[in-house]
Each structure stands twice: as C-alpha cells, then as structure tokens.
Image (spheres, rainbow, N blue to C red):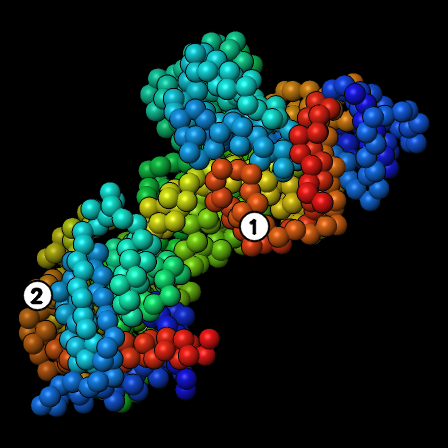
Amino acid sequence: MNWNKKDLLGLEELSKEELEHILATAESFKEVSTREIKKVPALRGKTVVNLFYEPSTRTRVSFEVAAKRLSADVINIATETSSVKKGETLIDTGRNIQALKADIIVMRHNYSGAAVMLARHVDISVVNAGDGWHEHPTQALLDIFTLKEKLGRIEGLQVAIVGDIAHSRVARSNIWGLTKLGAEVTVCAPKILIPPGIEEMGAKVSLNINEALKNADAVNVLRMQFERDELNAFPKQLEYFKEFGITKERLKEAKKGIVVMHPGPINRGVEMSSEVADGANSVILEQVTNGIAVRMAVLFLVAQARDINANTH
Amino acid sequence: MQILIKGGRVVDPANNIDGIFDILVENSKIAKVAKNIKDEAKLVIDAADKIVLPGLVDMHVHLREPGREDKETVESGTMAAARGGVTTLLAMPNTFPAIDSAENVSLLKEIIKNSAKVNVLICGAISRQRLGKELTDIAGLRSAGVVVISDDGSSVDDQALLLEALKKANQEDVLVSSHCEDKSLSGNGVVNRGFNATRLGLRGISKESEYLRVERDIELAEKSGTRMHIAHVSCSESVEIIAKAKKKGVKVTSEAAPHHFALNEEAVLGYDTNMKMNPPLRSKQDVEAIKKGLKSGVIDAIASDHAPHTENEKDIEFDRAEFGVIGLETELSVAITELVEKDVLDWKKLVEKMSYNPAKILGIAKGALGVGSDADIVIIDPSKEWLVKKEDFLSKSKNSAFIGKKLKGVVEYTFCSGKIIYKAKE
C-alpha cells in the first residue's frame, strides 16, 4: 500500500490496512537493531525534533534511538508546561521548529489534542508521542506488534486492559488499534476509572479482575498514578493491589500462555507483583525493544509521505 | 425623513401580520403599514421577494466593554449586531469592572450614548463583582436603568442569596436571568460528558450540572413568586423541567443559543476551539430536544450568547482556550437555515423567538411593526446563501462556530429608529 499520511496523531484515524502496513514496516526494521552496525541511511539528512512538554524518559529515548538508527539528526527540547503559560504558544514553537528546517516533530504534551492542533499549523510531520488522555499511538503500536510477535495474530484475540482507563492515552490507542485489527478488548478498573461511553469505542467493561482475565490471551497493565485528584476517593495502593493487582495466583486462573504487558514504568506491588513483572508471561522488556522498530517504521513512513507529497505538488 | 419600504413580505406577529405590505417610516417611527402606499418618500426601497421583520432583540450579548476592549467594544459589538439584524440587545454584566453598582451602570451608559449603533439595554450583576457573596443594590441598579440582573458566566451557588435577590427583584420588577451551572459537578470540564469527551480525552461537563441547577432555580423562583429567565438551555432534561414548571404556572421563560440547535458535540472532534463554549455542544438528542422546545414554546427566545475572545485566547490548546463564540452576525441566518428551512418554525414563530418574545420578556416596546412603533426594521433576502468568512466579521473577535459554513438568508438592510445602520454590500 502507499502510505500518504505526513502525521501520526492517533490510531482512531487509521484504517486496518494502514495499521498493518506500519506493523509490517516495523518488522523489516527490527532486524537493524540486531546488526553489528545498528544503522540504516533511510533518514540521512533529516532532522527529528523531540519536543517534550511532559517529563518522559523512556518514550523520548526510544524515539531518539529509533531516529538515530535511521541516521537522522536528533534534537531534544524538554520544556515545562508551567513556563509555557507565560511564554511562547505551541503554534509559535511549532513554526519556529519548522523555520529551523526540521522534518519531523515528535511531541509529548500534557493537553489532549495538542498534537492535532500542532499538525494543523505546520507543514512538517508531527508524530504524537502522547497527548493528555487522548492517544499514544506508538505505544499501542508497539504493544500490538509485541502481541502479534508472541501469539502470531491479532484477529480473534481477547485482550484485557487493566488500570486507570479514564486517564489513559495508552488504553484509548490500544482500544482503537486492537479492535480495528479484529481483537476483542475488555477494560477493567474500579468504576470511578471507567470513562463514560467507552463501550462506544468498541471495548467491553468489567469491574472484576478475575472475570476480565478469565478468557484473556493477553493483559495490558497500566501504570496507576495515585497522585491524581480523582483517585482520592479510591482506597490507596495496597487496596488497589488487593482488588486489581496482577499476581501469580490470579494468572493461575487465567489462560496458560497469557501474555503480560506493561507500558512502564512499573509500580511493583501496585499494578502487578514483581514475580509477574519478571515472570515467564511477561514481555515487558521485549516491548521496549520492539518500541524501537515501531518508531523507526513510523518516522520512516511519515518522512516518506512528506517527500512524496512535496514531489507531487 | 421618509422612507418607503415597498412590496416586501411583512412578518409581524405582534400585529398578527404576514403578507405583502408597504411600510412608511417617518422620522424614527413607523407611520403606515398598508398595501400600495402612495406617499412621497425621500428613499424608496424595493423589497419585492424580500422579508421585512421587526429588528431582532438579542437578550444575551457580551460586549466586553468596559475592561476588555481588545475582545469587543460597544461600538464594534453593536456594528456586528446591525449586520446580524439585531437592533436591541442586552449587554451582560461580566465586564471589568462588573456592572454591579449604579456608578458602573452610569459608566456603561455613557459609553453606550457615545458609541452604540443599536439600542443597548443593561443587565446588572446579582452579586458584587459577580462573586456570589454579597448582593448588589438591586433598587439602585434599577433606578440607574438596569432591566435585568444576572451573574451570567457564573451561577449563584448560595441559595439564600439568590432567594434574597429574587425577592428584591420582585419588588423592583427586575427580571432575573439565570446561568444554570453547578460548578461542583461541571468542574474543569470542557466538552459534553460522554463518548465524545472520552474519545477526545477531554474532561466532560455533565448535563446534571445544568439541569439540576435549572430545577433548583425554578423552585426558588416559584417560592419567591418572581419571574425568572433561564439562559442558554442546552439539554433535553432542562427543556423538560422548564416545560413542567410552565405547565404548573411558574413565571419562567427561557432562551436557547443558535449553536445549541445547529451543532452537536461531534463538531468538537478535531479540537476546534471555536466549538468550545459553556454550556457545551451536547448530543444529537439534545439538539432535537432544543428544536422541539422552540417549536412547542417551552423555549421562548433565541439569544446569541455572543462571547467574543481574541485569537490569542482561542488559538491554543483546547483545555486552555476560553469558552464562548460570537453569534450576533450569524444568529438570524443560522435560525433560518436550521429552523425555518427545516420546518421547525415558520417565519412568524421565528420572529416571535428572535424579536417579539424577547421584547416582551424584557418588558420593552420593541419587536413590532405597528403604526407608531420605533422604526427598528430588518429587510432580508430569504433565498440568498452566503458563506461565513472570518475576514467579514464586524465584531472585533472572529471566534465563530460557523466559519466555513453556508447559511441561508442575508440581511440586506437594518434600520434602527428609522436610520439605516447597516446595508449589505452589492
């Protein structure tokens, strides 16, 4: 297929074919990281700007490694949102980066929709590295890539997503991506963390972890952030662990080869026990490795789309 | 000076008229309404195939002056009104300073005297600085010229304070207009709560935050025997509550804004901040309920809730952008497009909602084209379509939810007290 999107803003707007195309492209890039010289010239001469308005180490580093393995030049801009309030608007920042003749902006932002807005105002590519509670497309893509690698398919799989669904961009992107590819998704959390209308996105809802795990081929465990105001009503970490934590005992009741994922960083003993995190079902570190391949694919595709668009105009 | 408007379809529910008539304007008043007027006139306007309406009365407008002249001024806002066919408007009190004292009313009156192009009525605040803590001097506001009081933009949380305000308003015969929102329920929400908010990852504003407050405020109005007006009704439950209250005989009236019957929450997909307003765009079912409410008469008036904001306040992240949209220049055409063209209202009913009823609610002698009435007249071409363009707005701010939309019905002339205050470009 011909990829023609200059931006990757979310998985909601992608078709099944487009999702499959990214995954196939990622597959071909995965091998690069196993070479002795871990580099291809695909993005030589291109400049990738990592624009991070929210502290993030793993996503930023993963994008940086991905860009460098494609031979792009990488610039990191980390900025606190508090200073943004007084300073430059997002649109101005984007236009300035464009004026530097950068090719791709990879942006993490704490407000939902920020990447969508930025993409409307610049001609260069925008890759959403997580915006508010909205989407985190590359995380979901690497989750799906890992799952497919482990289980050979996505179609027909039962996937449970457990944790703070309401405030999770990872959950939203996973729901869009997985359901488009034919998986069945069940979200599981205390009621207060289930956002209204989530069923209309194509997910089932369960308030009971054992029920959610029962037929699951995979479980994606989200990081719990207890510092949120909304969680004040909810009993603290130990209680959460007791009711929703993924433990060895709970996995014994689940399907035998259930795949356990986590976008990291893990709160050991809160969302899952250390035994599970380090256990045989866990693919958490493989997710990190696959993240490079998936992000290489995304950077490559959006840059290529922009080159093609530029040549045809 | 005499002006003769010839051969237009005159729609004037106040005088139960809908037909082809000539209108003769003498000085600032309507002198004759009849077939084939033969009088000499300095200016004769051929209104064949046009519709002639009483000037619109918009009872919910934020003119921003004093204090936020970067967003709008009395002059720019009333020029925008003239372009939209609005000849009388109610200026809301959330200015800086707020219109919470006789002195501030005088200050605003002076600005209006010097720069307004249309009739501007003044809404005073219920509480000082609109903080909901201490009542304003309602009698003082009334004698300074205020006709309505409201803490618009905020709801009065303190029931005792609102009850006190209602009692005073009753004594002074001032209308209380209520912005119904329980902040403890709407919180930091920015769009309608539900599936769309969830898929956008934005905080929701529940319908309960509106209708529970509508219920409470109507109860207090009933208790105090005071008439009350419910501003910007946006959801089906509010319509039902108002319908019940009216049936019961409570003296309550209500208004809806054009965006609440023309657009639903799906317009927010894409994070266009010109679709961010409070109350938010609701579901399709709510839009239908608003239309039904307009048709049945539960909703008495259409009011723009014209809320200008600068581009700096709108072209930012959705969460940080200001709530509100401008509406004066599009409300009539939006209403024609969505209500008349779609057979929700006929022309007579439309004029009731946009002119006659709001005039009645405000207790002013407007909204009619009878002999002796003020010559506030709008002539429109009902069949002409126009494209809403940002650069054409006369308002200082451009934050319209209808940019890029095609609308039916073009205002050709607007007269205020017999003077042409707006004429469309050829």
What residue is shown at x 60% (from left), y 26% (from top)? Answer: B117
Quarter that holds the C terminus of chain B: top right
Residue pointed to by mark 1: B389
Q: Position of residue A252 (x, y in %)?
A: 14, 78
At x 32% / y 61%, what residue is drawn? A115
Secondary structure at badge 2 equals loop
| Quadrant where the image shows the N terminus of chain B | top right
Look at mark 2 in the image and give the residue it sits on: A268
Please tell me whether mark 1 or mark 2 is closer to you in this view: 1
Chain of the residue where label 1 is placed in the rendered structure: B
Left or right, A240 with reference to B145:
left
The x, y position of residue A281, in whole percent, is 14, 81
Residue B118 in picture, x, y percent from top left: 61, 26
Give me the chain letter of mark 2.
A
Choose top left, top right, bottom left or bottom right for residue B128.
top left
As measured in the structure, the alpha-carbon distance from the residue carrying label 1 to the one carrying label 2 is 56 Å
Q: Residue at x 91, y 24 (%)?
A: B39
Q: Position of residue A227 (x, y in %)?
A: 16, 50
Amino acid at dot 1: Lys
- Let me know if marks 1 and 2 both belong to one chain: no
Query: Which residue is depicted at the point 33% across and 41% down?
Result: B187
Horizontal arrangement in the rendering, residue A44 relative to residue A36 (left or right): right
**Amino acid type of the residue tagged 2 in the rendering:** Arg
SS class, disc 1 = loop
